[in-house]
């Protein structure tokens, strides 16, 4: 812009100087020629009036007068007769001159008019001005007198004028360059500052301001831009504050939120929804929901709402395994006071665990009913048999009573396990802080289970590493956990098998030391698909084998909750036909 302004100023000034010079030269030239023509016309008229007819009739005597007049006027004098023949010429021998009837000025004079013309002389290399007047005798034209003069003075004057014009042009170039540069700087400097500041504002630097002291139009523009930037800064700050609050609210919600327009293009999505729907793409705004969430159930749900304008909730299975269940709630997006729906806002709730708990509760009730019904049926049946029994056969009566006692004992164990599990789940147990000697607790547990392992000739091996710290917690619950794990290992290990128990400390630093307890057998093993549900209440991998072995089906569920009571973790690795290993990790502090 500065270059264009500078160039335009220089061009305008140069054109002004050049045009003024050329016009001045033309005017001077025209005036000088006009003056010369007038002078020559006057001189020609004087000669004609002074000499009159004698110019034609007494040419030999007239030469003297004509030459004197030439000396006074410094002009060339030529006299021709009515036929155009030269009879007198002050500069050349007239006898050698051609007929002049065809010359423009002579032709005009011979017609009775004053004639004039300007012609270039190739001999003298200069323009000449010619003026002719008719010579009259009465009313007849008997000849003409012509005055001519070279235009040396005019030529020299014009040359000087052109030189002055050139000097003026050169001076104008210098002056216009300096003036143009200064004017361009004065014009473009504030424009540059306005442009630079506006570009900074457009990039988010709303605190930038234009500092101009001029009170012209550019100064007013700068003030307007400053006011606009200030208001824009206030507006954007307010919007950012609102957006931060809104994003904080949306991010802190436990449910997912997605807003879509009527074309199912995403307007907004919060991080919880991204996590629930497994979205990894960071730029999802403006995309169709099917591009982001590959789930036809959600797409069909939205289409149905948009088509019928009826808002309802639904549940969808999000993945192919049907293990993730999401509940969707839809509400319309409307402008204030408007009836038209501009989109849908969807609240997403993960109900997988809730549905899982409902299923477990249903299964638990069914299993408890079954487990309670089986021993009660046996007790009731044998009791009725005893009522009508002949007591002479004492051996059968004792057998029936033993069965009733076994079923009652089984029922007692089941109720005890249910109560224990309920207490652990509801955290109703007292937070005991006993000092538990790990090695002693393991020995006591093994002594309880020794008779059971001896029956199947199962070898129990123990490895307690030295330097093991004591554990703080409920000692009875700790031993119950070990009993359930080792008892399970013995039950599901064939005769002549082996069950090993290992305990050691895993050190990190003083506050992160862990107690690791491993219970490993070489029994039948557990298929991988059953391991995730292994700690559910009444879950059985092999129901037929479970009935032959016995048990309440709550042992591993109790183990899990005892581990949780100790703020620990439990891991399972197993291979069918090779055995199973339970690994318990408990913090020592």
Image (spheres, grey):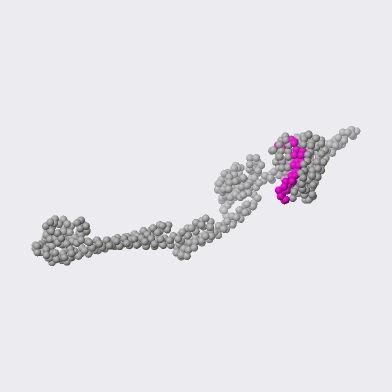
Residue sticking out furthest to the front: 466
Query: 500 or 208, which is in the foreground?
Result: 500
Residue 427: tell me if it is visible: yes
Task: Please identify the quarter of the rendering in which residue 184 is found.
Answer: bottom left
Q: Position of residue 541 (x, y in %)?
A: 73, 37
Q: Position of residue 208 (x, y in %)?
A: 52, 60
Task: Judge left or right: residue 385 versus residue 150.
Answer: right
Residue at 52 percent of width and 55 percent of height: 203
Residue at 81 percent of width and 45 percent of height: 440
Residue at 22 percent of width and 61 percent of height: 151
Query: 498 or 58, which is in the foreground?
Result: 498
Task: Please identify the quarter of the rendering in which residue 183 is found.
Answer: bottom left
Total numbered badges shown on the rendered structure: 0
Query: 530 or 446, which is in the foreground?
Result: 446
Q: Which residues are magenta?
A: 499-527
Image quarter of the N terminus: bottom left
């Amino acid at each position: 812009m500065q270059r264009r302004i500078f160039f335009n100023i220089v061009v305008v000034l140069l054109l002004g100087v050049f045009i003024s010079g050329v016009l001045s030269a033309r005017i001077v030239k025209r005036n000088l020629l006009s003056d010369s023509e007038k002078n020559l016309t006057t001189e020609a008229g004087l000669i004609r009036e002074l000499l009159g007819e004698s110019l034609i009739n007494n040419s030999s005597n007239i030469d003297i007068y004509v030459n004197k007049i030439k000396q006074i006027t410094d002009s060339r004098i030529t006299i021709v007769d009515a036929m155009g023949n030269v009879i007198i010429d002050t500069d050349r021998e007239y006898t050698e001159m051609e007929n002049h009837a065809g010359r423009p000025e002579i032709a005009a004079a011979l017609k009775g008019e004053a004639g004039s013309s300007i012609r270039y002389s190739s001999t003298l290399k200069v323009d000449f001005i010619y003026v002719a007047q008719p010579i009259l005798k009465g009313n007849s034209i008997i000849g003409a007198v012509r005055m001519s003069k070279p235009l040396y003075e005019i030529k020299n004057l014009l040359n000087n004028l052109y030189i002055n014009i050139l000097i003026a042009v050169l001076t104008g170039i210098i002056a216009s360059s300096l003036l143009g540069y200064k004017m361009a700087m004065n014009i473009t400097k504030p424009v540059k500052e306005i442009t630079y500041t506006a570009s900074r504002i457009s990039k988010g630097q709303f605190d930038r301001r234009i500092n101009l002291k001029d009170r012209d139009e550019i100064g007013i523009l700068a003030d307007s831009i400053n006011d606009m930037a200030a208001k824009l800064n206030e507006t954007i700050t307010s919007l950012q504050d609102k957006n931060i609050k809104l994003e904080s609210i949306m991010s802190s919600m436990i449910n997912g939120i997605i807003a879509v327009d009527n074309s199912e293009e995403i307007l907004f999505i919060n991080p919880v929804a991204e996590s629930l729907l497994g979205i990894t793409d960071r730029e999802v705004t403006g995309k169709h929901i099917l591009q982001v969430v590959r789930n036809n159930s959600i797409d069909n749900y939205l289409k149905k709402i948009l088509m019928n304008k009826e808002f309802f909730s639904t549940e969808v299975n999000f993945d192919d395994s049907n293990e993730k269940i999401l509940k969707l709630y839809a509400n319309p997006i409307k402008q204030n006071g408007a009836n038209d729906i501009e989109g849908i806002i969807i609240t997403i709730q993960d109900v997988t665990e809730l549905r899982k708990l409902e299923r477990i509760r249903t299964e638990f009730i069914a299993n408890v009913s079954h487990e309670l019904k089986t021993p009660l049926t046996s007790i009731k049946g044998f009791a009725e048999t005893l009522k009508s029994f002949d007591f002479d056969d004492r051996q059968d009566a004792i057998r029936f009573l033993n069965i009733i006692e076994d079923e009652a004992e089984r029922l007692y164990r089941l109720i005890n396990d249910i109560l224990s599990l309920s207490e652990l789940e509801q955290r109703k147990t007292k937070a005991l802080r006993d000092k538990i000697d790990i090695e002693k607790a393991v020995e006591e547990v093994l002594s309880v289970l020794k008779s059971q392992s001896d029956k199947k000739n199962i070898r129990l091996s123990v490895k307690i590493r030295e330097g093991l710290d004591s554990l703080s917690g409920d000692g009875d619950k700790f031993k119950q956990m070990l009993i359930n794990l080792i008892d399970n290992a013995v039950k599901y290990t064939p005769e002549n098998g082996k069950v090993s128990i290992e305990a050691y400390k895993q050190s990190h630093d003083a506050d992160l030391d862990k107690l690791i307890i491993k219970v490993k057998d070489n029994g039948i093993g557990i298929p991988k698909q059953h391991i995730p549900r292994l700690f559910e209440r009444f879950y059985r991998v092999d129901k037929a084998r479970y009935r032959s072995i016995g048990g309440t089906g709550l042992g591993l569920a109790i183990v899990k909750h005892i581990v949780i009571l100790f703020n620990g973790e439990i891991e399972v690795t197993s291979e069918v036909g090779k055995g199973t290993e339970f690994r318990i990790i408990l913090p020592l502090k």
